[in-house]
Image: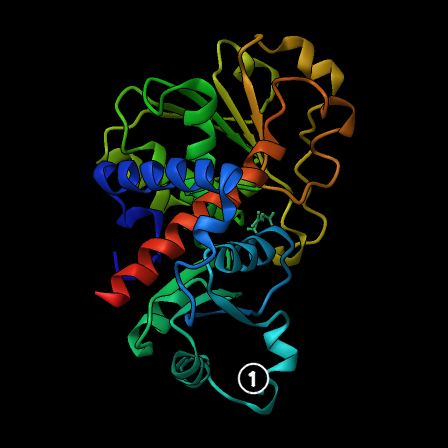
Amino acid sequence: MEHIISAGQFTKDNIERIFEATDEIRSVSQHNPRDLAQRHLGKVVATLFYEPSTRTRLSFESAAQRIGAGVISTENAGEYSSTIKGETLEDSIRTVASYADAIVLRHPSDDSSERAVQVSEVPVINAGAGKGEHPTQALLDLYTIKDTKGRTHDLDIVIGGDLRHGRTARSLAQLAALYSGNRITFVSTPELQIGADIRRYLDAHDTPYFEADELAPSFNNVDVIYWTRLQKERLQDPSLASHFAIGPNELELLGKDTMIMHPLPRNDEISPAIDTDPRAKYFDQVKNGLYIRMALLDMLLRKQHS
Ligand code: NCD
């Protein structure tokens, strides 16, 4: 693992190692945080964000600092970096790679991390590439599933919302396809369906999937509901809507062990009225994101020492 670009790059073995490292770092972090604070002294992580972020950027920055690395950051690189003067992504990456030991990149182009690794001398982590992928989100999502359900296989998973533009849904579907017995139901309107590339990926991995444009029937016996927001900033047709919302009424239809997930930020597709229901796991995802990112940075920065 040199760079983290796509959920499609991981094997089950990789993921097992990442989850073991995450378990360990989560435990040390909760009981003895000072033990971690010396690990990567003198190293620097750069967060280069060309799109807005709350959780991803701040969790990576918190993760880096908790394992002893310093952080340099541009949170609005499109406006406050030399991009505004016409600099290419490639030149910016080359430059930042001279100052940092790893680059965490969020960018509106689907192929931004592939472009970045071509020119970067240090590991690049895709922290959200356009409507393409968000692999570290998928890892924290799968970790949360494992933490809650005790397994990552033989799961009935509903993934819904704006699947055409939602990179987290696309990355999670790829990870779910690695494990036997998983079945995915995609719930969206016809305009917002999951891309053909992901369907091909699922076919190639023998993962059964179904498509639905109604919410309630997909709720029978489901283990995981993964909901996403309408990606308004990526819509060409601003009148498109996703219509699907989960609130107290929908909750009534769910089994007692169904977990409800969302990468956040949410709009009105998940009502805050269900936040206190034990099945709502989106704030667990937030917490696990920190530990997954600590583990990933730790692994990448260690590799650089050796
Ligand atoms: C997501 C993203 O940026 O892709 N947020 C996140 O990283 N947790 C989801 C979104 O913006 O809808």
Colour convention of the picture:
rainbow
Q: Is residue 50 left or right of residue 96?
A: right
Q: Residue at x 39, y 83 (%)?
A: 98
Q: Amino acid at mark 1?
A: Thr
Q: Quadrant of the C terminus?
A: bottom left
Q: Position of residue 94 (x, y in %)?
A: 38, 83
Image position, residue 198 (x, y; %): 36, 42
Task: Kindly tell me whether residue 134 is visible in this rendering.
Answer: no
Residue at 37% x, 55% y is 298
Q: Residue 249: x percent and y percent?
A: 74, 14
Numbered label tally:
1
- The answer, for residue 218, to whether it is visible in the render is yes
Relative to residue 83, is residue 284 depicted above or below? above
Element class at badge 1: helix
Q: Residues within 10 Å of mark 1 (few under 14, many from 20)?
A: some
Image quarter in which the N terminus is found = bottom left
Please report the residue visible at 57 percent of the width from the left and 8 percent of the height from the top.
Answer: 255
Question: 203 or 76: nearer the eye?
Answer: 76
Q: Nearer the viewer, residue 9 or 54?
A: 54
Q: Which residue sits furthest right? A: 273
**In the image shown, does 192 or 256 lie closer to the viewer?**
256
Task: Tell me: residue 281, above or below residue 238.
Answer: above
Which percent across, then down, holds residue 90?
40, 81
User: Relative to the observer, which residue lies in front, 45 or 226?
Assistant: 45
Q: Which residue in the protein does label 1 denote? A: 83
Q: Residue furthest bottom?
A: 85
Identity of the residue drawn at 45% across and 80% down? 96
